[in-house]
Image (cartoon, rainbow, N blue to C red):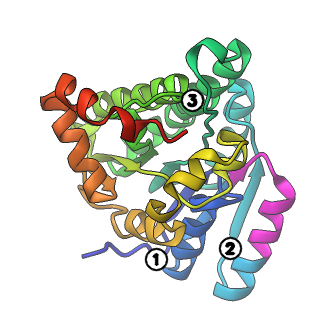
């Protein structure tokens, strides 16, 4: 059963589009107080107006590039001054670029890690002291099935999501005694503008279109598990089954699935 979100204070990064935006709508519908952050401030302002008008709630928006640690610290200090309790942090901001390892631009790789990994860690560190003090809260990290099964042309992106899962699993053990829940969300490809950057040639989207997840469905799965003890959400189920087989029989899995992996 989903927990009540009424009057809970929820921060969502990367909230200007994709599943971040859809989660914001669902949380607002359930009566939560929202803090939405993203680089695209105009989109956030538009979203704020829609949510406040439709659901009669208060939404706070902040422009933030999570890749800039000093900016994360400044923005989150402002957020924490306005809220005496943070119930949920959703680390949703992230991006990917699909290239062969030999073709990857090192600055692009650094940017990917700065956003997907270091930004996530920086945001988490800002809310942890308050959650520990209140002995309550939840950190939700949007990772990826790519963090479990690496495929061609996703070496840097998969590495960043492997890092997110490693951090998430360690953090869960560290904060359990403080009453804080930590959940990883590992979706397969989602039908969002993520691929405008990740797959500029459109090859991957064309090849996996019929398997792509709907953003509303993914967002609902996440929001339904907020403030519960759920450890992971893995979507779709058949892809997660593949990750289990891969963990048990990696060599066999790579041989058998070689052609299926080359979708990018």
| Above or below: residue 148 compared with residue 239 | above
**Residue with the mark numbered 2:** 58
SS assignment at label 2: loop
Q: Is residue 233 magenta?
A: no
Residue of label 1: 6
Pick the quarter of the image with the N terminus.
bottom left
Q: Secondary structure at mark 3?
A: helix
> In front here: 220 or 127?
220
Q: Residue at x 49, y 42 (%)?
A: 263
Numbered tag placed on residue 169 in the rendering: none
Rendered residue at 52%/79% (across/down): 31
Question: Is residue 257 depicted above or below 184 in this figure?
Answer: above
In percent of width and height, residue 262 lies at 46, 36
Q: Nearer the viewer, mark 1 or mark 3?
A: 3
Marks 2 and 3 sit apart, C-alpha to C-alpha, by 25 Å
Give the magenta range.
Answer: 37-49
Residue 122's disc number: 3
């Amino acid at each position: 059963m989903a927990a009540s979100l009424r009057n809970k204070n929820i921060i969502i990064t990367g909230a200007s589009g994709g599943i971040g935006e859809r989660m914001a709508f669902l949380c607002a519908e359930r009566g939560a107080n929202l803090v939405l952050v993203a680089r695209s401030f105009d989109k956030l302002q538009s979203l704020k107006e829609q949510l406040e008008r439709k659901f009669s709630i208060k939404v706070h928006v902040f422009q933030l590039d999570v890749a800039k640690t000093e900016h994360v610290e400044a923005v989150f200090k402002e957020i924490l001054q306005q809220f005496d309790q943070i119930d949920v942090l959703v680390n949703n901001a992230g991006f990917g670029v699909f290239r062969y390892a030999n073709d990857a631009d090192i600055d692009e790789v650094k940017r990917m890690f700065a956003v997907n990994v270091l930004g996530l860690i920086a945001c988490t560190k800002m809310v942890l002291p308050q959650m520990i003090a209140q002995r309550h809260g939840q950190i939700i990290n949007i990772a990826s099935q790519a963090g479990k099964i690496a495929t061609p042309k996703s070496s840097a992106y998969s590495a960043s999501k492997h890092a997110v899962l490693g951090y998430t699993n360690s953090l869960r053990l560290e904060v359990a005694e403080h009453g804080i829940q930590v959940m990883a969300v590992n979706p397969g490809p989602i039908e969002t503008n993520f691929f405008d950057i990740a797959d500029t040639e459109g090859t991957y989207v064309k090849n996996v279109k019929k398997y792509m997840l709907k953003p509303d469905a993914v967002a609902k799965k996440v929001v339904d598990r907020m403030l519960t003890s759920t450890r992971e959400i893995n979507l779709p189920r058949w892809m997660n089954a593949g990750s289990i087989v891969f963990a048990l029989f990696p060599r066999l899995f790579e041989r058998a699935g070689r052609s299926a992996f080359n979708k990018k």
